[in-house]
Amino acid sequence: MVKASFFNIVRFSALSACVLVGAFIYWSLMYLKPRMPSEVVLERKTEQRHVIFVKVHKAASSTVQNIMLRFSLARDLNVLLPLDARNHLNDAGSQILPHLVVPHPTGGRFDIMCDHVIFDESIIAPYFPEDAVRVAIVRDPLQQTLSALTYFTHVFQKPELKAGLDRYRDAPLEGFLGHPEQFYDPSQGAARSYINNRMSVDLGFDLRDFETSKKNISKIRAFLDKLEKQFDLILIADYFDESMVLLRRILNWGMKDVMYLEVNTAAGNDKGFQDSNLNQRPFLNSTTMLAFRNWAAIDYALYNHFLTVFLNKIEKEELFQEEVNAFRQARDSIAKFCVQVIAPLPAHNRSISIAETQWTDAFSVLESDCKLMAKREVDLMALAIENQKARIKTSKGDTSLVSKNDQQSL
Ligand SMILES: *[C@@H]1O[C@H](CO)[C@@H](O)[C@H](O)[C@H]1NC(C)=O
Ligand SMILES: *[C@@H]1O[C@H](CO)[C@@H](O)[C@H](O)[C@H]1NC(C)=O
Ligand SMILES: *[C@@H]1O[C@H](CO)[C@@H](O)[C@H](O)[C@H]1NC(C)=O
């Protein structure tokens, strides 16, 4: 008897629970209209044409710059560029000198930025519409610094780095990582150095008391919090394809827009590194690694923080790895095609078609696309600058204002 009524109660509770859950699901479907995964995937939003990309040094950022400039050229957008392809918008300080940039044809706001800067929100923001998406990229600090060390001793020589290498001729890598401060001229300041937490310098870390700041956890924390607010997306060079797919999704760009050729990747740029004796990696003992970690403390905090943010973001995306795979497959076909058309051999095909995927439209890549993707950084910058200067002469109008209505906010 007691047992029976107990089961009755259980049965009754189970029944009411089912009714309640059912009612809730019905109500949710009717009133909350949850977005089904297929709807999210198939939705085609307006592409975002206002992008501020901070080209952080030695972090595969030339490849992203190539992507941004090709996008701008294809759509005839206004790009904030230095007057001379050998210069940058700024380098040793955060000011942008108006007489050193190509002016906007009608004095309006620019659509795209993708050059080296020392980022200062209050200086950059006035050049762009408010809805501009702010993007940057970071890379594993050890790889990033070794890449800088190679570049600035092999391609573009810096005397203080050369002097450091000469001092540790027998074991340059151990010498550098164990004593990075001996490869640096403190009188020049962190903004003129490319091996002293340059990623954080590029993103606007306070340069005063720089060496003491490396131990100031609260100051570093405040810097990361500021970046969280200022940037919509921080890409990770070590997850480059994932970064391109996430960038594409956030900007609502096509697969073709974020396509690239390996020639411009960090690996390609690090050719000097591969050829040099710096690449003969000895066993790095814990003392050496600790010395480098202390030296690059701000960049390590930056990288670790935004790597976690990035991995969390891609984990929440639908069918993300599937799209990365489709992207890589398309890139392999395009790379094979481009090698064939760029080579001085007579080419058989002058375009390649990439089929539609569930994420992006079909597209074709022409010989001219290959050539743009393979262009050296300085040559593509020169082309973009020439194009931007021609806009002043023909005064094609302010696309940043015209396209305002088309923009979807993020
Ligand atoms: C750390 O940085 C904060 C904020 O810039 C500053 O107020 C504080 O005095 C610094 N602490 C030390 C120990 O330097
Ligand atoms: C680590 O390597 C450096 C450079 O080769 C050397 O000077 C140092 O004594 C080593 N430290 C340890 C704990 O082995
Ligand atoms: C070249 O074109 C033919 C015919 O359109 C096509 O079947 C073939 O896959 C193409 N080859 C490459 C490498 O794109």
Image (cartoon, grey):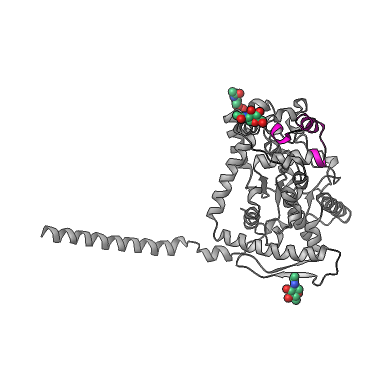
Q: Quadrant of residue 12?
A: bottom left
- Measured as percent of width and height from the top left, residue 76 is found at 79, 58
Residue under the point 32% across and 61% down: 20
Indicate the quadrant of ligand 2 in the picture: top right
- Measured as percent of width and height from the top left, residue 403 is found at 72, 57
The region drawn magenta spans 153-175
Using the image as rendered, state which of residue 306 and residue 222 is in the foreground.
306
Q: Relative to 183, is 101 above or below?
A: below
- Measured as percent of width and height from the top left, residue 145 is found at 70, 39
Could you tell me if residue 334 is visible in this image? Answer: yes
220 vs 119, left or right, is: left
Q: Relative to 178, is 235 above or below?
A: below
Using the image as rendered, state which of residue 118 and residue 111 is in the foreground.
118
Q: Quadrant of residue 41?
A: bottom right
309 vs 137, left or right, is: left
326 vs 339, left or right, is: left
Residue at the far left in the pictured view? 1
- Measured as percent of width and height from the top left, residue 272 is found at 78, 45
